[in-house]
Image (cartoon, rainbow, N blue to C red):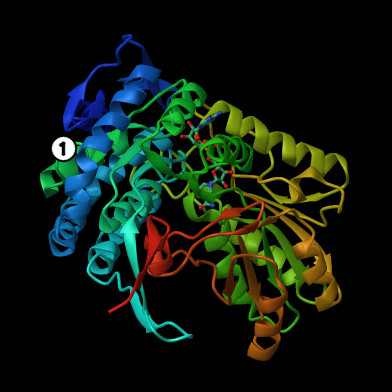
């Protein structure tokens, strides 16, 4: 049944480069394989863009820019609305595809597709609300008119962990603002982005407005994209390491840059927390997307008074998670995306255990095909363990105990990252004080999930620059033009 579904679905998925509204092969014939992480077998073989394909994609985006920038906001809005509707009609098909190339369980994949669609709905609404301003100059005599213009051709580079949502979170605001784009999806998961290209065409996006260039040679292709004169913007989601490299490229051409980078989210449980609610929040914050999320809770700081109760209940909930191929109905946790990702998770766990951490559940690679790793809870993790300093990106929860709130906040802030923090307390005053003291772009206060297309998503410190989602997300694709008017 499942293999028949896979065969049927993948036969219709495009595998070429999408440039200027048409499908083509790579100019040098290069290809790469997309692997199903549950079976380690090849799903499809996809064209791998060359640097000359990168130039062609920017040329197509540049050619489409003047007319798209002048297209009435209402028209752009309705195209995005149609794209929202088309994705919503195809939740099952897209979820299955995401699960196939990324490994995530269907409930996570369905949630991603709905989340991805919401960016098109939100930005269809924002497209017609890009207000500027008018004021009298303080010295009098003339007016200050400010309007927001499309910034130009935008290069979008996305990661494998949310193949649909990280693309729509960028394409939505870019198109709403009147920009044209070249998208370079992650090499592990290009298929979803290619289907999105088809879907956007069906929604009415004109040729050249959205171009998609999968590429195994990411460094060379993205470097070439950013070096083109027509490009004025780079929006990247991925690791801090690659983001830093792209910022160097951006500096050479003074490109506007939005960077959604790595996280190392602390999850604080204060002594007065509702432990049931904290366990529910921990399951969401840790296990959404199998732990492969930049927002995933990476370090659990739990007050010593509730640490045993929290640890036991959390471990019991983790033990109940059903592991299997992501696309099999009933699966709650699929495999990790690839062998290297699983190796990293396993080595972080081993390091913590060698330093004296205690296993509450999980902790060992199962003997089966596929890049599986079990839900794992480690307790009393020593402060010098690598797992507390690095992004785990897997279903592993390390717990550290604390005795004073200030100590927990200091521990939470003792990282170069600052994407999101979570905290549980019944006392809202205490919670708001802590939320203000936490150094992160987002805080979940008695909530294990913060992502929302209508809210500004983003980090501080090494977690990034700029915001995606909300009204702020669209301003990232505009330039303020000030006109001094004497009338
Ligand atoms: P990655 O940095 O390895 O890759 C991201 C993208 O960059 C991919 O498209 C990849 O092909 C491309 N790339 C890789 N090397 C490149 C190079 N030298 N030059 C140009 N492009 C290059 O990240 P990943 O492994 O795909 O994703 C996981 C990371 O993404 C994690 O660190 C996670 O925290 C982060 N992430 C952040 C957010 C956020 O919103 N802050 C969201 C999702 C993921």
- What residue sits right under mark 1 in the picture? 207
Q: Is residue 301 visible?
A: yes
The residue lying at 56 percent from left, 51 percent from top is 294
The residue lying at 81 percent from left, 77 percent from top is 405
Q: Is residue 113 visible?
A: no
**44 and 56: which one is in front?**
56
Placement of 314 over or under 409, stated as above or below = above
Cβ of mark 1 under 8 A from ligand 1 = no
Give the quadrant of the N terminus: top left
Please state the total of marks drawn on the protein image: 1
Q: Is residue 385 left or right of residue 91?
A: right
From the top left corner, tell me how far across and down residue 90 is, in percent. 19, 49
Give the quadrant of the C terminus: bottom left
From the top left corner, tell me how far across and down residue 37 is, in percent. 45, 30
From the top left corner, tell me how far across and down residue 135 is, in percent. 38, 83
The residue lying at 66 percent from left, 34 percent from top is 344
Q: Is residue 192 left or right of residue 344?
A: left
Could you tell me which secondary element the residue under label 1 belongs to? loop
**405 and 481: which one is in front?**
481
From the top left corner, tell me how far across and down residue 130 is, in percent. 29, 69
Image quadrant in which you'd find residue 298: bottom right
Placement of 442 over or under 394, stated as above or below = below
Image quadrant in which you'd find residue 62: top left
């Amino acid at each position: 049944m499942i293999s028949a579904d896979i065969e049927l679905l993948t036969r219709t998925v495009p595998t070429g480069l999408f440039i200027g509204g048409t499908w083509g092969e790579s100019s040098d014939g290069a290809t790469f394989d997309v692997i199903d992480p549950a079976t380690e077998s090849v799903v499809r073989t996809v064209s791998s863009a060359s640097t000359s394909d990168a130039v062609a994609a920017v040329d197509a985006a540049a050619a489409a820019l003047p007319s798209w920038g002048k297209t009435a906001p209402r028209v752009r809005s309705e195209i995005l609305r149609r794209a929202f509707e088309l994705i919503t009609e195809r939740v099952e098909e897209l979820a299955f595809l995401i699960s196939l190339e990324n490994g995530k369980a269907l409930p996570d994949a369905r949630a991603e597709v709905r989340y991805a669609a919401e960016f098109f709905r939100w930005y269809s609404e924002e497209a017609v609300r890009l207000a500027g301003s008018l004021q009298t100059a303080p010295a009098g005599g003339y007016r200050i008119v400010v309007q927001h213009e499309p910034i130009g051709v935008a290069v979008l580079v996305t990661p494998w962990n949310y193949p649909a949502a990280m693309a729509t979170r960028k394409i939505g605001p870019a198109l709403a603002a009147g920009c044209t784009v070249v998208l370079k999806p992650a090499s592990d998961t290009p298929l979803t982005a290619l289907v999105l290209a088809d879907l956007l065409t069906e929604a009415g996006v004109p040729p050249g407005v959205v171009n998609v260039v999968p590429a195994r040679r990411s460094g060379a292709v993205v470097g070439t994209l950013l070096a083109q004169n027509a490009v004025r913007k780079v929006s990247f989601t991925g690791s801090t390491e690659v983001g830093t490299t792209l910022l160097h490229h951006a500096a050479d051409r003074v490109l506007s840059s939005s960077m959604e980078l790595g996280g190392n989210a602390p999850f604080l449980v204060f002594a007065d927390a509702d432990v049931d609610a904290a366990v529910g929040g921990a399951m969401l914050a840790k296990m959404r997307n199998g732990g492969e999320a930049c927002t995933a809770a990476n370090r659990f700081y739990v007050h010593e008074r509730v640490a045993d109760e929290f640890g036991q209940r959390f471990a019991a909930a983790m033990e109940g998670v059903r592991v299997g191929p992501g696309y099999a109905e009933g699966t709650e946790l699929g495999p990790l995306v690839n062998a290297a990702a699983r190796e990293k998770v396993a080595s972080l766990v081993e390091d913590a255990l060698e330093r004296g951490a205690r296993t509450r559940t999980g902790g060992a690679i199962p003997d089966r095909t596929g890049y599986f790793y079990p839900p794992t809870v480690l307790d009393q993790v020593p402060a010098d363990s690598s797992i507390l300093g690095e992004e785990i990106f897997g279903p592993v929860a390390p717990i550290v105990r604390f005795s004073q709130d200030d100590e927990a906040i200091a521990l939470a802030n003792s990282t170069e990252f600052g994407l999101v923090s979570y905290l549980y307390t019944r006392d809202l005053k205490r919670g708001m004080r802590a939320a203000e003291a936490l150094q992160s772009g987002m805080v979940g206060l008695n909530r294990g999930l913060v992502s929302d297309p209508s809210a500004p998503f983003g980090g501080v410190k090494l977690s990034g620059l700029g915001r995606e989602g909300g009204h702020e997300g669209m301003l990232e694709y505009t330039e303020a033009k000030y006109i001094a008017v004497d009338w």
